[in-house]
Image: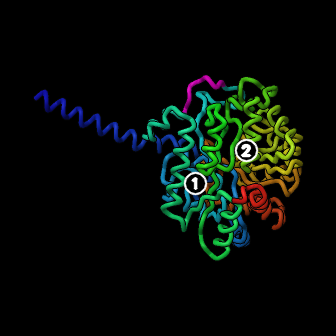
Amino acid sequence: MLKRILLALAVVFVVVLVAFFALAPAYVERSMNPVTMPEEGWPVSEEARALHRQLVINDWHADSLLWDRDLLTRVDRGHTDVPRLLDGNMAVQVFTTVTKSPRGQNYDQNSAASGDNITPLFVGQLRPPKAWFSLYERALVQAEALEDAARRAPHQLRIIRTQGDLAQLLAARAGGQRVLGAILGSEGGHPLEGDLDKLDGLYDAGFRLMGLTHFFDNELGGSLHGEGGSGAGLSDFGRQVIDRMMQLGMIIDLTHAAPQMVEDVLAIPGARPVLSHTGISSHCPGPRNLDDDMMARIAQAGGLIGIGYWSDVVCGRTPADVAEAIAAAIEVVGEDHVSLGSDWDGSVDAPFDAAHLPALTQALMDRGLSDSQIAKVMGGNMMAYLAETLPQR
């Protein structure tokens, strides 16, 4: 009798454990990445849909790889997957790897020594054990997931590493193929773990963009949300990383960088950094958005500003609020330096998912932007930047 009871308890335990690992990560993702779109969707005119179909659309930032789901499969949670991105007419999406997030994360001040939110997520998702306690391996595991998806469905997804890859993608799309280009990026430089050789390892794995910091100071320098404040600039190691990134042709992303770090990068001859996902301070004041003068100087250096979609940076939850932030960005940096930086699947809210991106085209038309301006913002500016800055081969 006792053996039967113990066996039954063991079976119940296994069932509960399997259910936890199967359902808990999806529950967390669903709660962390809400879509604030009304059930019937945002109204989009036929005129807006026609314009949207003609656009070459690019986006600087999505954290979808963090959630360990097959990007080739359409799901009813989060903001993106390949089918929804193709429905939204996306041409190129930057997928960033998230490797560390401090416990109690906030926009004001975080410690690198505080607990990490990503470790239990990786364990709960049953990611490879090598990635449980190594930030570098976490980045590589997420990169491998994207590589695997592209290998299984090359007609739907291609990884972009060079200018030639980009040209081939555009030619395929111009010929009628529904295919998405994916660029790998890293949310912060901490996966290097203080080792410059690991930058080459990331490059060889396909990474072509890297943020310098995320929500905490790291070996490269100061975060906008770290303990060092605005006085924390590039460290000596950070300067070595920048030099090597420029040699490799990797894109420098200053999102989450402390103001002094931004100043230090802008002082480096030839640096052409981007802000991949942000808002405009004069439009939406807050600790997440750098001041307008710094935005303008990034643009003057030949960089781009990617406007995010979530309420903390655009001060609203509708496509019109995102369009207003884009219009404000044009006022600050000019129409040739504004692009999209959704932060989809980045533990943020969004007024629409990737499939409903035409709602933004409608909002930009309603805001009074010309077709030419809309084409630039929705992808033309980013495409021109990538064609000039990606490695030639």
Q: Which residue is mark 1?
A: 80
Q: Residue, x 85% and y 35% (percent of image)?
A: 263
| Picture quadrant where residue 271 is located | top right
Q: Is residue 112 magenta?
A: yes
Taking the view exactly as shown, the residue that stands out farthest to the bottom is 175
Q: Where does label 2 land, which residue?
A: 245
**Residue appearing at x 34%, y 37% in the figure:** 17
Residue 189 falls in image quadrant:
top right
Q: Decide whether the magenta segment is chiefly helix, strand or loop.
A: loop
Seen from the viewer's position, the closer of residues 88 and 304 is 304
> In this picture, is 44 found above or below 148?
below
Of the pair 20 and 263, the residue shown nearer to us: 263
Compared with residue 60, is residue 289 higher up or lower down, i.e. above or below?
A: above
Q: For the point 73% across and 31% down, which residue is it?
A: 237
In the rendered structure, does residue 343 fall within the stretch colored magenta? no
- Rate crowding at label 2 as few (under 14), some (14 to 19) or many (20 or more) other CA atoms within 10 Å: many
Secondary element type, mark 1: loop
Stretch in magenta: 111-117
Residue 182 percent location from the top left of the image: 62, 57
